[in-house]
Every structure is written in structure tokens, then in C-alpha cells.
Image: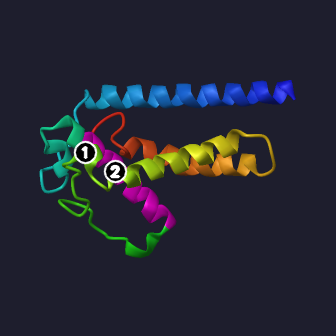
């Protein structure tokens, strides 16, 4: 129904606007300052090579996705070298985990947007997982 689709688009736009306002408020409150974690807490942010940082953060997303699906090896502390840096970037075999994680996420998103049964539940499930993850993902600001 066209009215239902229009309402869905309006809700999505409203959610994006709300997220943008919250991000702006956070930036204003912190004046753009990042958290004051030391090298032992987050060695990724102290690496001088931008590609190593990027691939390492993306690999962290893949590891967290794996832990979400297979939580058998959870740890209470992921500081320092618990998740090693991807120093070789795309040439590192662990980059395949990054590709697999984001391809799986894209496949789930495509399935949730395709017509058919269960797509609303899948979309809601993706939102429940992704929305809380975005602020701590290092996509918009370094944590």
C-alpha cells in the first residue's frame, strides 16, 4: 500500500534526523574531544598508518559479529592485543573475515528489504543489533 510505504519512509527519515541531532549534541557537549584511553586500552587509535587503523577497526567489527553469533569465547577484557592489528591490511588473511561479515550484513539487509514473509521481523532484528552498535563502532568518532 502506498500509504504504508510513505509512512515507513517518513519513519526512517525521522530516525535518521534524530540520530543526526544526537550526534550533533554529543559533538557539542564533548567539543569533538575523543575519549582519553591509553595505548594499552586501544592500541589501534595510536597506530600511525591510516590503512592499518581502518582495517583493524573493520576487523574488530567482524570479531564482534562472530561473537554475536558464536559467543563461546567471550572475554571480559579486549584491551591491548586481544584483537591484533591488521598490519598487512587487505593482504592479511583476516581481511576475508571483514569481507564475510559485511557481505553477510548486506545480504541480511537486502533480504529484509525484499518482498516476502518475515522481512519486517528481520528488519527489526537488524535495527536492534545495528543501532546500538553504531556509536561504539569508531565509524563517526574514535572510542
* In magenta segment, residue 65: yes
User: Which residue is under mark 2?
Assistant: 95
**Most prominent secondary structure in the magenta stretch?**
helix
Q: Are marks 1 and 2 in contact (CB under 8 Å)?
A: yes
Q: Could you tell me which quadrant the C terminus lies in?
A: top left
The residue at the point 50 percent across, 31 percent down is 19
Whether residue 92 is situated above or below residue 49 in the rendered picture? below
Q: Could you tell me which quadrant the N terminus lies in?
A: top right
The residue at the point 55 percent across, 43 percent down is 106
Where residue 9 sits in the image (x, y, percent)? 69, 26
Q: Residue furthest right?
A: 1
Asked where in the image residue 26 lies, by quadrant, the reply is: top left
User: Which residue is under mark 1?
Assistant: 89
Q: CA distance from mark 1 to mark 2?
A: 7 Å
What stretch of residues is rendered in magenta? 53-69
Whether residue 39 is situated above or below residue 20 in the rendered picture? below
Where residue 54 sits in the image (x, y, percent)? 28, 40
Asked where in the image residue 140 lies, by quadrant, the reply is: top left
- Depth order, front residue of 19/6: 6
- Disc 2 secondary structure class: helix
Where residue 4 sits in the image (x, y, percent)? 82, 30
The residue at the point 64 percent across, 41 percent down is 110
Whether residue 24 is situated above or below residue 72 in the rendered picture? above
- First in sequence: mark 1 vs mark 2: 1
Could you tell whether 47 is left or right of 68 in the image? left
Could you tell whether 64 is left or right of 3 in the image? left
Q: Residue furthest bottom?
A: 72
Amino acid at each position: 500500500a502506498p500509504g504504508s510505504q510513505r509512512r515507513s519512509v517518513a519513519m526512517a527519515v525521522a530516525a535518521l534526523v534524530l540520530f543526526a541531532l544526537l550526534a550533533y549534541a554529543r559533538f557539542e557537549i564533548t567539543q569533538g574531544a575523543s575519549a582519553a584511553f591509553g595505548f594499552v586500552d586501544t592500541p589501534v587509535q595510536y597506530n600511525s598508518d591510516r590503512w592499518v587503523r581502518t582495517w583493524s577497526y573493520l576487523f574488530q567489527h567482524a570479531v564482534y559479529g562472530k561473537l554475536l553469533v558464536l559467543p563461546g569465547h567471550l572475554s571480559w577484557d579486549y584491551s591491548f592485543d586481544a584483537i591484533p592489528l591488521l598490519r598487512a591490511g587487505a593482504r592479511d588473511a583476516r581481511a576475508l573475515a571483514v569481507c564475510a561479515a559485511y557481505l553477510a550484513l548486506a545480504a541480511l539487509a537486502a533480504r529484509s528489504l525484499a518482498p516476502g514473509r518475515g522481512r519486517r521481523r528481520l528488519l527489526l532484528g537488524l535495527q536492534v543489533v545495528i543501532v546500538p552498535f553504531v556509536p561504539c563502532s569508531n565509524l563517526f568518532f574514535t572510542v
